[in-house]
Image (spheres, rainbow, N blue to C red):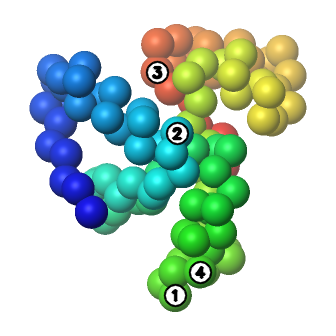
Amino acid sequence: MKTIYLHPQNPQPRLLEQIKQVLRDGQIIAYPTEIGYALLTHITAKDALAKVSKIPTVKQKDQHVIVCRNISNASAHADINDEQFRIINERCPLCQVEIQ
């Protein structure tokens, strides 16, 4: 297990690349949130998703969130109609989109 500390306003590109590589390799990342920790895997990492589901404290009813780069990427994973697209675009034009 490796710990990487990122500066919240100015993360080092080298560390971001390390994180991307860990995800591409099918590993699981734990990162802090406002209410605890979240687990992150690459969406195509089926083995990592299976490992997460075997953790005793993770229940089937726990929320799974897909974090997308942009609205176009989100629409590949969810049905987003024109009205929803407009609302998302108005409220978070530069932010990541979460699909729950």
Snapshot quadrant of residue 36 = bottom left
Measured as percent of width and height from the top left, residue 21 is found at 42, 36
Residue located beneath label 4 in the image: 54
Image quadrant occupied by the N terminus: bottom left
Q: Earlier in the sequence, mark 1 or mark 2?
A: 2
Label 4 close to label 1 by CB (< 8 Å): yes
Snapshot quadrant of residue 35 = bottom left
Residue located beneath label 1 in the image: 56
In space, the residues marked 1 and 2 are separated at their CA atoms by: 25 Å
Measured as percent of width and height from the top left, residue 41 is found at 53, 51
Residue 38 appearing in the image: yes
Residue at 80 percent across and 35 percent down: it is 78
In space, the residues marked 4 and 3 are separated at their CA atoms by: 31 Å
**In the image, what residue type sits under mark 2?**
Arg
Task: Compare residues 59 and 93 and report the one nearer the observer.
Answer: 59
Other residues around mark 1 within 10 Å, as few (<14) / some (14–19) / many (≥20): few
Q: Earlier in the sequence, mark 1 or mark 3?
A: 1
Residue located beneath label 3 in the image: 95
Task: Compare residues 55 and 86 and report the one nearer the observer.
Answer: 55
Residue located beneath label 2 in the image: 24
Query: Please, what secondary structure does the residue beneath circle 3 have?
Result: loop
Query: Please, what secondary structure does the residue beneath circle 1 have?
Result: loop
Query: Please, what secondary structure does the residue beneath circle 2 have?
Result: helix
77 left or right of 59?
Answer: right
Label 3 close to label 2 by CB (< 8 Å): no
* Disc number lying in front (1 or 2): 2
Measured as percent of width and height from the top left, residue 5 is found at 15, 43
